[in-house]
Image: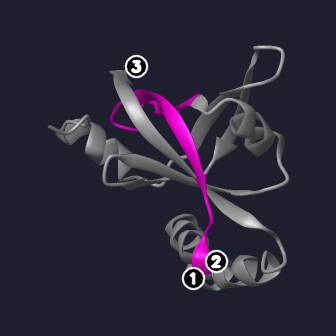
């Protein structure tokens, strides 16, 4: 059985800006805006490896993502779970996510500009999905 109903999948199919929250070493939330994409039941996010959110996830994989909630979004969802850090061979997810959020010409420029970055995949394995709006 899917964690997402039809309305949730409709919201998650939109290129909205998500907010990812992870826990810092002092136990406080660290929340930042990110691009995302649904991959089966998982939420996929890309990130440069040398960010605080990646450092915090390495120490504690628990986190959450909030997606939607604005009047025109069709709903909003809080998705809680555990993150898995994965490589992005051949920049597959970099390409997919960049083209999801940007026009093709700009996407290709950004992909080229990021070629020297160590970009990885942050995959949220959801445990709970809560409708919040």
Residue 78 location (% of width, % of height): 45, 26
Q: Quadrant of residue 90?
A: bottom right
Q: In the rendered view of the protein, which quadrant contains the C terminus?
A: top left
Q: Secondary structure at mark 2?
A: helix
Magenta span: predominant SS is: strand
In space, the residues marked 1 and 3 are separated at their CA atoms by: 33 Å
Residue 65 location (% of width, % of height): 53, 33
Q: Which residue is mark 2?
A: 107
The range drawn in magenta is 63-89
Q: Residue at x 51, y 72 (%)?
A: 96
- Are the residues tagged 1 and 2 within 8 Å (C-beta)? yes
On residue 6, which mark appears?
A: none
Q: Residue at x 76, y 34 (%)?
A: 56
Sequence-first tag of 3 and 2: 2
Q: Nearer the viewer, residue 130 or 122?
A: 122
Q: Which residue is mark 3?
A: 132
Q: Is residue 74 magenta?
A: yes
Q: Quadrant of residue 101?
A: bottom right
Q: Is residue 15 magenta?
A: no
* Colouring: one colour
In space, the residues marked 3 and 2 are separated at their CA atoms by: 31 Å
């Amino acid at each position: 059985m899917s964690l997402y109903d039809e309305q949730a999948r409709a919201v998650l199919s939109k290129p909205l800006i998500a907010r990812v929250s992870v826990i810092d070493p002092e136990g406080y939330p660290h929340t930042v805006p990110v691009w995302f994409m649904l991959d089966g039941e998982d939420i996929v996010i890309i990130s440069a490896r040398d960010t605080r959110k990646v450092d915090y996830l390495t120490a504690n994989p628990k986190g959450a993502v909030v997606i939607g909630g604005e009047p025109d979004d069709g709903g909003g969802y809080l998705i809680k779970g555990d993150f898995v850090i994965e490589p992005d061979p051949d920049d597959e997810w970099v390409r997919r996510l960049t083209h999801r959020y940007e026009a093709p010409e700009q996407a290709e420029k950004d992909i080229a500009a990021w070629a020297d970055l160590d970009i990885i995949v942050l995959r949220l394995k959801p445990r709970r999905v809560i409708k919040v709006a």
